[in-house]
Image (tube, rainbow, N blue to C red):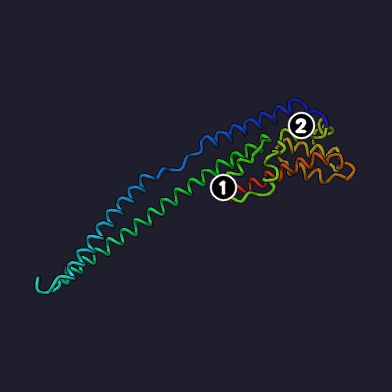
Amino acid sequence: WFAPEESGVEAALADHDARLTALRTDLDGLQSPPDLSGEIDGLSQTMTALTGQIADLEARIAALESRPVAEGGGVPVAEIEQLRASLAAQAAEVEALRAAADAQEAAARDSAVATLRRAALTQVRTALDTGSDFAPALTELRDTGAEVPEVLAEQAETGVPTEAALIETFPEAARALSPQEGDDPDAVLLRAEAALADGRLSEALTEIETLPEAARAPLADWVALATRRQEALAAAAALAEKVN
């Protein structure tokens, strides 16, 4: 293994830095969930007032139904029915308000969970680019109820090989040549190196798989590192799709 040409590494690092900056911008731009406490408190106060009105209506109905016949010539049926209709309307309004309050609380919780998940996923993606530890971000994801893929959990504390590191450690045999057609090892390595420099890691690994065993054996360590990154990226993409 040898050091890469400076121009190739500088270009890769520049691209890496640009993507890292974009990820940090995404993280900084995440909006906090809306504060619905005012609306929920208002609904609660309205329900309390309506509950008091319902209790008053029930007391009035009970008083009318218990009125002695001698006092008023009988129970005022029409008035009682009117009060009962008003009572039913008030009760329906309370139920509607309670449902609205429950919905707003649920929406606030869901919004908070979604925001936490987006932030944690952004941290994971940033860590995949920098090769840093992302165990805390996975813990945050688990706390929101997300199921974390095992392939990410296994590499969370050690970090994942970066794209720049894979470019830097790519076989020297591919560096002094240009991509070309053909099945000989040199041509395959050239195409793999070009795919890697383009960010097409899966294609690079596919090219290397076509090498004869004798030519592929010296690349085993590099392939293992590249496969770790490929699997982690795929798992992170699948996780993002699942929780968003």
Q: How many marks?
A: 2
> Where residue 168 is drawn, which disc sits there?
2
Q: In percent of the image, x 67 and y 43: which residue is there?
A: 233
Front position among marks 1 and 2? 1
Please give left or right for residue 78 compared with residue 36 in the image: left
Pinpoint residue 86: horizontal percent, then vertical percent. Answer: 23, 63
Q: In percent of the image, x 52 and y 46: which residue is there?
A: 114
Q: In percent of the image, x 71 and y 44: which residue is there?
A: 230
- Splitting the image into 4 quarters, where does residue 21 fall? top right
Hey, what amino acid is under mark 2?
Glu
Pinpoint residue 76: horizontal percent, then vertical percent. Answer: 14, 71
Please give left or right for residue 197 compared with residue 243 in the image: right
Name the foreground residue: 65 vs 206.
65
Hey, what amino acid is under mark 1?
Asp
> Where residue 70 is drawn, which disc sits there?
none
**Which label's residue is closer to the chain start, 1 or 2?**
1
Name the foreground residue: 17 vs 118.
118
User: Which residue reaches farthest top?
Assistant: 6
Pinpoint residue 12: horizontal percent, then vertical percent. Answer: 70, 31
Q: Secondary structure at mark 2?
A: helix
Pinpoint residue 39: horizontal percent, then vertical percent. Answer: 35, 47
Relative to residue 55, is residue 31 depicted above or below?
above
Relative to residue 157, is residue 70 depicted above or below?
below
Q: Secondary structure at mark 1?
A: helix
Relative to residue 170, is residue 111 depicted above or below?
below
Residue that mark 1 sits on: 143
Cα–Cα span, label 1 and label 2? 37 Å
**Callout 1 touching callout 2 (CB < 8 Å):** no
Q: Few, some or many C-alpha atoms within 10 Å of disc 1 (few <14, some 14-19, many ≥20)?
A: few
